[in-house]
Image: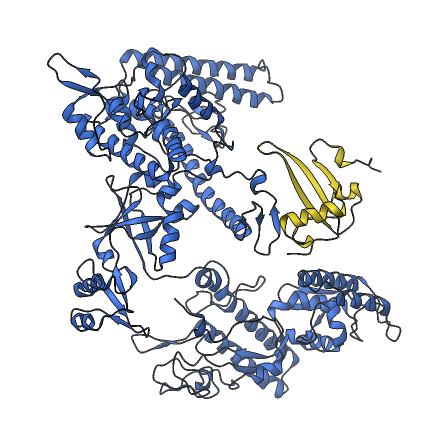
Amino acid sequence: MVSYQYIPKKIGKIQFALISPEEVRKMSATKIITADTYDDDGFPIDMGLMDPRLGVIEPGLKCKTCGKKVDECPGHFGHIDLAMPVIHEGYTKLIKEMLSATCRTCGRVKLPEERVKQYMERINNIDTISLKPFQYLSLSGSIRHEAVKVTQCPHPDCGEMSKAITLDKPTTYREEGHKLTPKEIRERLERIPSEQLLLIGLNPAVARPEWMILTSLPVPPVTVRPSITLESGDRSEDDLTHKLVDVLRINQRLQENRDSGAPQLIVEDLWELLQYHITTYFDNQTSGIPPARHRSGRPLKTLAQRLKGKEGRFRSNLSGKRVNFSARTVISPDPYISINEVGVPMPIALELTVPMRVNEFNFEQAKGFVERGHNIHPGANYIIRPDGQRLRLTERNKETLLEKLQVGYIVERHIMDGDIVLFNRQPSLHRMSMMAHEVRVMDGKTFRLNLPDCPPYNADFDGDEMNLHCLQGEEARAEAKIIMRVQEHILSPRFGGPVIGAIHDHISGNFMLTHHNPLFPKEEAYHILSRTSFKGKLLEPDIVDENGKEYWGGKTIFSHILPPGLHMEYPSAVYTGDGDVEEEDSLVKIFPDDDGRSRLVTGPIDEMSIGAFKGKLLEKIVRDYGSDAGREFLDDATRIGITAITLMGFSTGIDEEDIPEEAKLRIRDTLVEAEAKVDDYVKKFNSGYLEPLPGRSLKETLEVEAMRTLGRARDMAGQIASKYLGLKNSAVIMARSGARGSMLNLSQMSGCIGQQAVRGERIQRGYQGRTLPHFKQMDLGAAAKGFVKSCYKSGLNPTEYFFHSMGGREGLVDTAVRTSRSGYMQRRLINALEDLKVLPDRTVRNTSGTIVQFKYGEDGVDPTRSARSDPIDYEDIIRTAMREVA
Amino acid sequence: MMPQFNVMENYLVPRHSIMSEEEVDELLKEYGIVKGKLPLILMADPCAKALAAQPGQVIKIERESPTAGASNYYRLVVEEKTGL
């Protein structure tokens, strides 16, 4: 809502330059000479660091320089005249190159006349349009390099031999071992003729090399370094002020000592100290010198620290800012709201507002909001007069404001059901981390989130908090609704499948409803479908018993929520392909019946149908029927699942992992046998009879064989155990249908945990040739190297437990390291790619219009709208066509 | 002395060729750009060297692509990279 007429000035161009000592003095409001800030009465001392001419920080006072009050006066610079010149820490490398590229006596660039002429011509001829700064930069760099290499001044009237100049860490220069003082350096730089500056990278119009050596130091205004008054009445000064005090003190002592003719040694020491203070004033993390510290031992935050890094001005205050119209609270689940919605607690709904321009059509509505005020829900918090004045609504003034309200006012009304807001969870790693939701105002104090939305946000409810942003403009809301709405993000641009889909109990529920087609009487069928958007007549019942009672199969019930005309055939998650009798109902087939209504003919609905990341049915519905149909189907499918699982009942307990004694014995035998086999290998290894594998040493061969034998034994144990864990077992239902957990988890619980590994190898580390003192030295057997024979159910013995912890710890460390590393990697990628966009002609270009790709991704295919790396799913088209012909 | 190789003969190197003036004009017209907006290739690039490409010429690279079949890329030959 900022109008351009209020912007007083427009930036035409920016020029970077060096600041001269004269300029420092010219812009200075006062010279600073004393290191003291305030006198005993608490008034700022004239020509001190808090001089009133440097600006105002206390309300009510007027600035002595410009006469303005707090917030109006921008502050004014002062300056310190340095007793001796000091090197500016930021220019050390450039100073070195300037010194090395020019003659030490005559100051001219060490290149012969004709070279200079040639180069000047090239500089003047540089393409004046786009590439100028970069071409000049690399040219001047190579000129400097050429001049540095010359060992004797090529000018006939000079001919001085050059001496090598070295830079000693932060700010000390040496010429063949002899130390150069800043004063000497300054004198040399002064000798470089202005007309040659362009050659070595300086613009003589705005910079002289000697200005890189400071003789006067600008003192920033007090507004930049405000002092704060503590509750106790004590003043506490900003870090910058502290540093400036140091500079002033040493400067003063240096001046006194120098003027009184103190010994050279003392003057030089003080000079060096002054250099230290000024260096740390600019950057307190300069390598090679200890950082200046506060009295408490905390390192001071000086100029560079204010700007640099994640907490610096750029990344913390300019690229990213704190915003208004936002809210943050804990999230909790609500399976009965739509995936497009977000539950907003009442206290937040009373705080967040949307501006609403009053016109003759909504006048009555607007009056209603103002009348209810700030405390009753669909109310208002502010009204804005046409002159821009904001008035807060209170209990007391709402009647008067109501009378004033007229067309042209803006009412900031509370957010209400259906408003579009942005919802976000950090870390925001992809575009699905920030999606547009519709508001549902609710009781309670948490944001409510439907479960299918958890995978894209990577959210769970163990205390996660999320942020909500309330859009303030019509265009913003329209845009968010069209491109950021949750339903528009069901398909992921990463792999073209759904990132938003059914999880956990949704999948268990649908599986139980559809697997082996259980029958439901009319009341239950109605009950299940009552939670969905299905309207109309039920499909024919599957069975009518002798009493005329009707029963619907789970597959038929599920068929009600399918959109018409679906042809699909795919293996479900429980499909193994080995033709096991129990799994005959594992191929999903969906075809339209004679009325065109889609019917689930065979197969259970599980992760492969509706799950996040894998759900083929969901993917097809979104792709072929649109995101509205996709959202409706997902909402319905998850509700059906939840209703079914509640109706049928579902629980799991530790006894799910019980297996008969006979199975335990068989597992035991397998493991003992495997251990014996490993011992056999060890024996062969020790006696030298082990045949090494190609490309491996003897030791490696032993390890490989041991790992393989024990791995196979673990799998065997798992297989034996899972024979006794059928699809009647709740844990198995969850694992097989893809709801949660895996068969490996189950076999580790009831069979055998298996080999523990650190860095992909059996556990090796220990003292005196053994991993733990429980084993013999040089024992290479299974148990001594971390094979865990027990299962979680029976419990681990102490050595097994220790090895298991070692493996577990490695996992934890890995995840911690991975997140920080991938975070940084992602940051660099984003910085490199942030300004790229795909144009309507499918080229990828950056903001300067340079082409990066001639066709997006080489083939111009958007993965979200393509079928798994193919532009179209021709198999699907053929299948549908064939069915329709038949 | 190392034996000299022509990188262009390696099967992993896609076909590079120097475009004629007319082809370049057509290309620039197709994308509505000036030469400076093309991706760059260094004169010192092994392929540019093998073609003896001069600064200002445009090299056409014909790549095989598993998804697009074939895809063309165009690079402007430059003497040295200049930041940007």
Indicate left or right for A886 with A381 as reference.
Answer: right
Q: Residue A175, can we see it?
A: no
Quadrant of the rendered structure where residue A129 is? bottom right
Residue farthest toward the left in the current orientation of the protein: A547
Along the viewing direction, whichever of A351 and A735 lies nearer the viewer: A351
Residue farthest toward the right in the current orientation of the protein: A156
Quadrant of the rendered structure where residue A553 is? top left
Question: Where residue A302 sits: x, y (%)?
Answer: 49, 69
Question: Where residue A124 sits: x, y (%)?
Answer: 76, 68
Q: Residue A463, can we see it?
A: yes
Residue at point 85%, 68% (across, down): A112
Along the viewing direction, whichever of A724 and A853 lies nearer the viewer: A853
Q: Quadrant of the N terminus of chain B?
A: top right
Along the viewing direction, whichever of A384 and A762 lies nearer the viewer: A384
Q: How is the image coloured?
A: by chain
Q: Which chain is yellow?
A: B
- Above or below A518: residue A377: below
Q: Quadrant of the C terminus of chain B?
A: bottom right
Question: Where residue A561 sits: x, y (%)?
Answer: 28, 30
Question: Where residue A324 sits: x, y (%)?
Answer: 34, 62
Q: Colour of chain A?
A: blue
